[in-house]
Amino acid sequence: MELLPLLDQLFPEGHQVSVTDWLVSGEAVLGGAPVAVLGTTNHVFIGIREAVTLSGKLLETVAQHPKRPIIMLVDNNGQRMALDEELLVLPEYIAHLLRAQQFARLQGHPLIAIVYGNSIAGGFIAFGMGADRIVSLPGAETSVMKLEAISRVTKMPLEKLQALAEKVSVFAPGCKNFFKMGGLHDIWTEDFSGQLQRLLQSTDTRDIRAALGRERGGREAASAVIDDVLHA
Amino acid sequence: MKLSRRISYLEASARQRIAALLDPDSFREILPPTLQRISPHLGMFDAPVAFDDGAVIGEGLLCGKPVFLFAQEGKFRGGSLGEVHAAKITGLLLRAAERKPAAVLGLFDSGGVRLEEANAGEIGSTEIMRAIFAAQRAGVPVIGLIGGSCGCFGGSSIISSCCDALIASEEGRLSVSGPEVIETIMGVEAFDSRDRSLVWRTTGGKNRFLFGKVSKLVDDHIPAFREAATALIAPSIPLTAELLQAERQHLSKRIEQFSECTDARQIWAKMGLDANRVPEMSAEELSTAASSLVH
């Protein structure tokens, strides 16, 4: 879904959001109350510079607007894949961005991730999957690796993977599959602003994704294993 | 000079590492292989399964202190994060948040998310991260050890970077995209993954130590990992605005100082080290050289 119409649909009461070539940042009004808006666009790759820019915005929001909900608009093509970024320890930058999200959560900011574009692998981990609630919109694409690349790495024939992908959610790209695994709390198809307001009223900070994966039949082992370890 | 037989961390299996790391006979495994918690998905791909799904978890003693421990088995499907593998680690960390051992030790040896279970592995990776934060919030430090033959890549690299402290050997490689993946997708001129010294300079423990991400650099010797882990046990430091601002400034400064560098040797020279000698230095020698640098 396109960013600008999305902003109008999510925040019909008004928004002041600036958009650069990749960064989306500002504030909006929702149900009469202010919310912070922070996101990415143009399928940016999340690298070291993107990570410190996003963490800076998060820390600014925590400092200036205590407990204000943070609406994360997610669109990326994954982590930036380059020797010079790995040279400077890219995983440390992504972990720092996740720690900033955790800090915001502990300070009482609800974190809602809305996937409106692509969301891939380390990019989705860095900005999206760390939220309290994660939803997708029409046209969104989530994946870890394309089937062609999985075929190259695992040496399994592409035709076999394509056939399996039709019926097996555990590895195949797509929001429907992520939803079934509990990786998306919801898939919205209409009334985005109303849905966002209702979600903000009901959200909490518990990680319920393993339970969702069990309920939906996509990831039945995880929550049973976690329970068994807790009670062993 | 004290001579002792080297016990290689790199070559050991997950269970051998645990046995040599913890106090003798103190380890109690949770969900051991006898319970056969296997991957429910690998069968569809006609792939072999393991009764522990490549993750060993449990409780034991480190120099008398109660610790929880998880260890990835690199010899099973590259230590990859599958649904059960990840859930065992998440469960252990949540258990630590409740029961508050002195520390959780994470023995990383993993190429990242298991592609046959890509969605479950990726979601599971982020559940582990949330569980690390839960343990840390309870004051329990999570200490990562990196020195296995599979390194620490993909989802595992980000998980380990969320830890309170990392211990690594030079052989312990840490990066998000592995050299082979970068080469496959961006081309051999972007990263020649067969150039072993390039791979170690870029992703190896020495480079990660010199940037400060690895707290303690050790030689490839399990007792050295044990000593370092024991010394690093301290309550997890709570997240504050000041702490995160300082972290952010440190990381921003690194970009300003070193983003022009295209090879680790340029970085080391800029730091004031004899770049050509770094690869041949022992962990102790490099640690001494690093402590005298003015950043």
Image (tube, coloured by chain):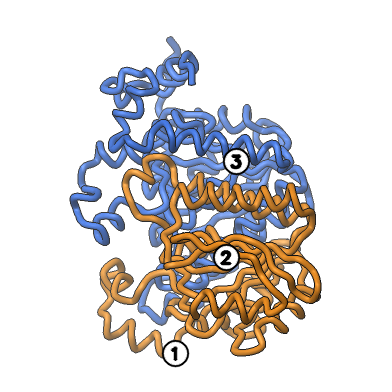
Chain A on-screen colour: orange
Q: Chain of mark 2?
A: A
Q: Which quadrant of the view contains residue A224?
A: bottom right
Image point 44% across, 28% down: which residue?
A: B210
Depicted B91 relative to depicted A197: above or below: above
How far apart are the alpha carbons under marks 2 and 3? 25 Å
Q: Which mark identifies residue B143?
A: 3
Chain B on-screen colour: blue
- Residue beneath disc 2: A128
- Asked if one can make out residue A134 in the rendered structure from this viewpoint, the answer is yes
- Residue beneath disc 1: A167
Q: Secondary structure at mark 1?
A: helix
Q: Nearer the viewer, residue B59 or A73?
A: A73
Q: Amino acid at mark 2?
A: Gly
Select label 2 or label 1 by which is in front. Answer: 2
Callout 1: few (<14), some (14-19), or many (20+) C-alpha neighbours within 10 Å? Answer: few
Furthest toward the top, the residue is: B1
